[in-house]
Image (cartoon, rainbow, N blue to C red):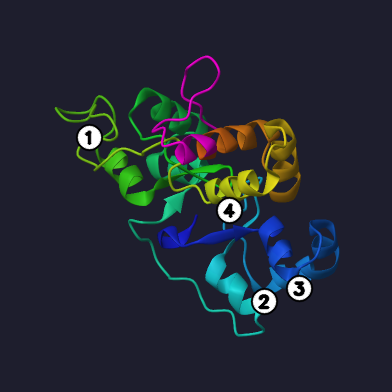
Amino acid sequence: MIPRNRPVINEADIARRAGVPLATWRRRDAPDFRSHVPGLLPDSRSLLYDLAQTEAYLAGKPVPSLPAGEHPDDLLTDKEAAAELGINPGTVRAYAAQGHLSGGTTVYGTRLWPRREVNERRDNPPGRGKGGGRRAGEHQGPRKAHPYDGDPRLQTATDALAAAASAPKSRIAAELAAQHEGTPRTWERLLTTAAALQDNIPHAQSNDGHETQA
């Protein structure tokens, strides 16, 4: 869980801030860091940490505590959402595909759902009562501008495009995957989205004309 949708950071970006290669940071610095700053998503492939706690640790300051208790803005993994709903994680993903939940938000390659949305679905399961089958997104505000709206990796992809000049997108994507985790294919999609936004195209598309997603 990411408490209250707070900013987070992964180990690749922590190492970059520390000015050392990721492998060196993990071998030399990670054990002490992890003993002071708790990981937020233990079931995820991406090791994520609270940004404010990380910055305090790197500055040699006391690490602040995270907010206690549940909050509607908490971001939950599929496993955490499944526990709230009394179903399995695969069903959570199916709900999202069928529109009974939104597509969630992607943070460093991990899909997450707001607790308020999960609790609403828990209290109004599909097929129960008059409004039980209401699809996610109804009465929930504006839709995302594109699949990676709000994803912090998008800025990384934008910066990489600006720095790489005419380098092939596949090579940029492979380098980003090595530096920041995730797959080269996902980074190619992020690069496509970043390029489209720079050209003022509202929705990034793949070569076959369909919207791309992670």
Q: Earlier in the sequence, mark 3 or mark 4?
A: 3
Q: Are marks 2 and 4 in contact (CB under 8 Å)?
A: no
Q: CA distance from mark 2 to mark 4?
A: 20 Å
Which residue is tagged 2? Answer: 58
Span colored in magenta: 195-214
Locate the C terminus by quadrant: top right
Tell me the element at label 1.
loop
- The residue lying toward the viewer, choosing from 15 and 53, is 15
Q: CA gap, disc 2 to disc 3?
A: 11 Å
Kindly identify which numbered label has been placed on residue 41: 4
Q: Say which amino acid is labelled 4.
A: Leu
- Looking at this view, is 33 or 157 the one in front? 157
Amino acid carrying label 3: it is Asp
3D distance between C-alphas at marks 4 and 1: 28 Å
Q: Which badge, 4 or 1, is on the more N-terminal residue?
A: 4
- Looking at the rendered structure, the kind of residue marked 2 is Leu
Mark 1 to mark 2: distance in Å? Answer: 42 Å
Residue visible at 26% across and 41% down in the picture: 142
- Residue behind mark 3: 32
Find disc 1 in the rendering and name its residue.
138
Location of residue 82 with respect to 61 vertically, above or below: above
Q: Is residue 140 above or below residue 152?
A: above
Mark closest to the chain's N terminus, 2 or 3: 3
Disc 1 packing (10 Å; few <14; some 14–19; many ≥20): few
Crowding near the residue tagged with mark 2, few <14, some 14–19, many ≥20 C-alpha atoms within 10 Å: some
